[in-house]
Image (spheres, coloured by chain):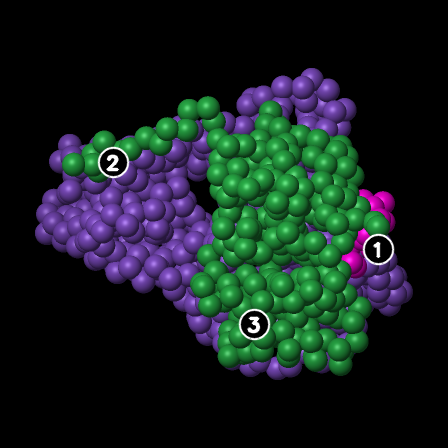
């Protein structure tokens, strides 16, 4: 038993060591720094009191469960498939994989956050500090195992249409709630902080059991300590057993639904592409999941402020859903893998246009229905919602194929994917990055229509339709040209799963930069949006609207005289950060090329 | 007569490795051409470049005189390709894949339906009417790939390892179809590392070794009275060909 554990932990360490180069190292470092900041924040709450610490651990637990769902199925360094031929009993395989799962940056960072238990214990009594040590380890085991079980269970759920829709709904709702966390914060504020009821619930959650044990020791209620520690040990055993059971079911890969074979009625080349894409949309359960997720996200995101009695956002469910759908489907060519060769063999066929039409046919109707119905419910304002919906639909239909061919993140061929249906690429970091880029770019395509609609009303709708059609047409044309011009290179990327180094004199890609510059660039690209969009543009928009909402917009909390200067400063700061992120690769454009191969 | 496929000085380097080094080959019209070589010799890379799926570093390829890179539409309408191990529209059934590709090629709806029906029945794929391509076995994938290659009635077939992982019954079906294609005036290039198969089917052979052409010509010219396998080992085998045994397996 111990040899299995040791070997798997050693294997994981070896893989991590070998992969700590280039882009991967930059990503790991960025993630590690962000994690350290969060862990620091958690330690800080340990000095504030038990309730806040329990809340912080609940957020960590959510992160462990949800994180992998949105980043390509989580850590798959050691895959169960690698060990199938060894004939290990499932429980032992799970234990071994668990040992491997503890090796990594995320568990290390989380362990640091969990030292908050020790800090909390030391402030109470020496005995409590002592109890914190086993509690910390058990708590980490629960987090890591919950994450693994969630991914494995989702993988099984995604084998049926109902499961795919159900998980899409739940995931969309949870992520939207996280995105609108300010609503809950204000709702809490209105009730005067964490209520006794909420405080108890936080300790009943598995994330609060470690804290409950330490608190019990601190107050001399040893029965509570024993109960909490025992419950944690039992939960670890149960999760391990559940994971082992799920692992054995993972052996066969996800299958598409086999119902509803209607004959193709298309009679043109472009119609054939639409027919193929529509069938893929309805038969690939991962795509079904993505679409349900996007719609659920839009609805719950827009509906969350209803908790505070505000219905101003409700009408915007449609536009938010378009943004999410575009981000989720950004790899529209990547998911087909090397099937691209067929497109290359028939150069005359308008593949991009067909895919655009299919995308609009799938995303358009539910989104338009949402926009119309919810705007009718809130009684307006009609022009901005309709203008932005039209603009974003066109923008999404244009940007999605464009990004997909210009910034191709090679996907794994569908018939070669492992037992984890969420993992469509070996390069999930780049895939997540692309999703964010698409989110921002598509949002930009809605900006002109939004501005005109807010200022002049109905003409904005005309602008929205016009920019939508323009984006659809123009970006589609660019994508088609790129596909024709660089098709063999794109296919080669799919085949090898590697992006080739950039050419002489061109800009270098981020993974060709020295490590330090990589980290700075990655940080620039991830934080630049905060001053530019929410703190700058959105704050300015709210101020121009003379809205009462202040939320977390710094400028709106300041005295009147400082508000506009701070907004302008934020916009400039955001642009500056993005500029730095561009300038670093630009500066390296000549010297990085010769040694890259 | 214009060769069905003419490869002139094709070269490709991946990083440090020279995969294909100035390969020249001519496939006469009406010939059944076998391209043989060890794994990694450069067969797939050569064929990919010849049909326009991989951009060469140098050289060119012509299909019935049409340059693959300067006249892609002309060249690609005359060739049917079966690449090794590439994805297909995975969430379609066999019939849907053929319908989709036929329409993409500009064939009329009626012709597509007719040919799809015939191909599916000849290749014995019509029983798996409800099965998606992603659920196909390896042998079925090869067969639907061959159907895709044949659908638009090309005059040249370029097949990369068409018999790899195909069961003997399916292999016999495929052989019959290919022989019929050549008898009807078509030309075929196939790559393989199974010498017996190439000897059985082909009338022309090209031997590729380490990215270069080691020998090319009619089957008789290349093997010169010996078996193709002996010739092949003589051409590409290293000086030290004494096969080593595994010590723990011999008693």
Q: Position of residue B41 (x, y in %)?
A: 56, 36
Q: Chain of mark 1?
A: B
Q: For the residue carrying disc 3, how many other residues have a C-alpha within 10 Å: few (<14), some (14-19), or many (20+)?
A: some
Quadrant holding the N terminus of chain A: top left
List the single residue furthest toward the front.
B225
Q: Position of residue B143 (x, y in %)?
A: 56, 65
Which image quadrant for residue A111?
A: top left
Residue annotated with mark 2: A7
Q: Chain of mark 3?
A: B
Identify the residue at image location x=72%, y=69%. Answer: B102
Identify the residue at image location x=70%, y=80%. Answer: B114
Q: For the residue carrying disc 2, how many other residues have a C-alpha within 10 Å: few (<14), some (14-19), or many (20+)?
A: some
Residue B73 lies within the magenta run: yes
Residues at discs 2 and 3 both on one chain: no
Label 3 or label 1, whichever lies nearer to me, is: 3
Chain displayed in green: B
Please report the bounds of the magenta region as a residue range.
B63-79
Determine the colour of chain A: purple
């Amino acid at each position: 038993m111990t040899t299995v554990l040791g070997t798997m932990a050693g294997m994981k360490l070896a893989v991590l060591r070998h992969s700590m180069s280039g882009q991967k190292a930059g990503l790991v470092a960025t993630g590690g720094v962000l994690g350290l900041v969060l862990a620091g924040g958690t330690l800080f709450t340990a000095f504030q009191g038990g309730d806040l610490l329990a809340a912080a651990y609940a957020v960590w637990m959510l992160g462990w469960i949800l994180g992998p769902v949105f980043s390509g199925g989580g850590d798959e360094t050691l895959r169960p498939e690698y060990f199938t031929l060894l004939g290990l009993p499932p429980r032992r395989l799970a234990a071994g994989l668990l040992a491997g799962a503890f090796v990594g940056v995320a568990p290390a960072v989380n362990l640091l956050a969990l030292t908050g238990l020790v800090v909390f214990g030391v402030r109470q009594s020496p005995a409590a500090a002592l109890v914190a040590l086993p509690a910390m380890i058990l708590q980490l085991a629960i987090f890591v195992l919950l994450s693994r079980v969630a991914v494995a269970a989702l993988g099984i759920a995604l084998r049926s249409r109902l499961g795919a829709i159900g998980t899409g709904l739940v995931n969309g709702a949870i992520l939207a709630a996280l995105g609108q966390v300010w609503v809950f914060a204000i709702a809490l504020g209105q009730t005067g902080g964490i209520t006794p009821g909420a405080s108890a619930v936080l300790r009943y959650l598995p994330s609060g059991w470690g804290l409950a044990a330490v608190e019990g020791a601190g107050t001399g209620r040893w029965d509570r300590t024993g109960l909490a520690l025992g419950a944690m040990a039992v939960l670890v055993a149960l999760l391990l057993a559940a994971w082992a059971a799920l692992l054995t079911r993972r052996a066969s890969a996800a299958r598409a639904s086999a119902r509803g074979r209607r004959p193709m009625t298309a009679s043109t080349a472009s119609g054939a592409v639409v027919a193929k894409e529509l069938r893929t949309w309805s038969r690939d359960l991962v795509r079904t999941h993505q679409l349900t997720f996007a719609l659920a996200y839009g609805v719950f995101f827009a509906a969350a402020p209803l908790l505070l009695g505000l219905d101003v956002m409700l009408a915007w469910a449609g536009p938010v859903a378009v943004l999410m759908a575009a981000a989720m489907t950004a790899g529209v060519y990547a998911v087909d893998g090397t099937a691209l060769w067929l497109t290359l063999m028939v150069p005359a066929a308008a593949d991009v246009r067909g895919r655009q039409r299919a995308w609009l046919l799938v995303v358009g109707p539910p989104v338009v229905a949402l926009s119309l119905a919810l705007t009718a419910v809130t009684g307006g304002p009609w022009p901005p919602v309709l203008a932005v919906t039209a603009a974003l639909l066109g923008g999404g239909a244009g940007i999605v194929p464009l990004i997909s061919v210009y910034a191709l993140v090679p996907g794994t061929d569908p018939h070669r994917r492992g037992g984890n249906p969420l993992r469509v690429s070996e390069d999930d970091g780049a895939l997540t990055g692309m999703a964010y880029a698409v989110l921002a770019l598509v949002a930009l395509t809605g900006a002109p229509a939004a501005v005109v609609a807010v200022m002049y009303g109905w003409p904005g709708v005309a602008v929205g339709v016009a920019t939508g059609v323009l984006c659809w047409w123009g970006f589609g044309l660019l994508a088609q040209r790129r596909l024709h011009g660089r098709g063999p290179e794109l296919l080669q990327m799919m085949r090898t799963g590697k992006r080739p180094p950039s050419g002489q004199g061109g800009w270098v890609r981020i993974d060709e930069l020295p490590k330090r510059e990589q980290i700075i660039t990655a940080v620039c690209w991830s934080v630049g949006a905060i001053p530019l969009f929410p703190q700058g543009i959105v704050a300015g928009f709210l101020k121009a609207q003379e809205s009462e909402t202040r939320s977390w917009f710094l400028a709106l909390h300041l005295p009147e005289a400082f508000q506009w200067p701070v907004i302008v400063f934020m916009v400039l700061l955001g642009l500056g950060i993005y500029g730095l992120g561009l300038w670093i690769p630009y500066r390296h454009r000549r010297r990085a090329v010769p040694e890259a191969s | 007569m214009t060769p069905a496929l003419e490869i002139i000085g094709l070269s490709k380097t991946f990083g440090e490795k020279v995969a294909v080094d100035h390969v020249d080959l001519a496939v006469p019209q009406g010939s059944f051409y076998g391209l043989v070589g060890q794994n990694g010799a450069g067969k797939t890379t050569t064929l990919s470049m010849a049909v326009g799926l991989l951009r060469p570093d140098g050289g060119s390829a012509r299909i019935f005189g049409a340059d693959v890179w300067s006249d892609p539409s002309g060249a690609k309408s005359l060739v049917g390709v079966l690449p090794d191990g590439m994805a297909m529209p995975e969430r379609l059934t066999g019939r849907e894949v053929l319908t989709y590709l036929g329409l993409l090629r500009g064939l009329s709806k009626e012709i597509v339906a007719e040919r799809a029906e015939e191909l599916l029945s000849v290749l014995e794929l019509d029983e798996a009417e409800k099965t998606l391509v992603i659920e196909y076995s390896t042998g079925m994938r090869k067969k639907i790939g061959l159907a895709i290659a044949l659908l638009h009635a090309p005059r040249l077939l370029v097949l990369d390892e068409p018999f790899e992982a195909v069961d003997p019954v399916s292999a016999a079906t495929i052989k019959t179809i290919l022989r019929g294609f050549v008898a009807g005036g078509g030309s075929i290039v196939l790559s393989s590392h199974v010498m017996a198969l190439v000897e059985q089917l082909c009338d022309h052979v090209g031997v590729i070794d380490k990215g270069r052409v080691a020998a090319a010509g009619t089957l008789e010219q290349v093997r010169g009275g010996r078996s193709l396998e002996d010739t092949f080992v003589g051409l590409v085998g290293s000086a030290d060909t004494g096969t080593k045994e595994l010590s723990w397996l011999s008693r």
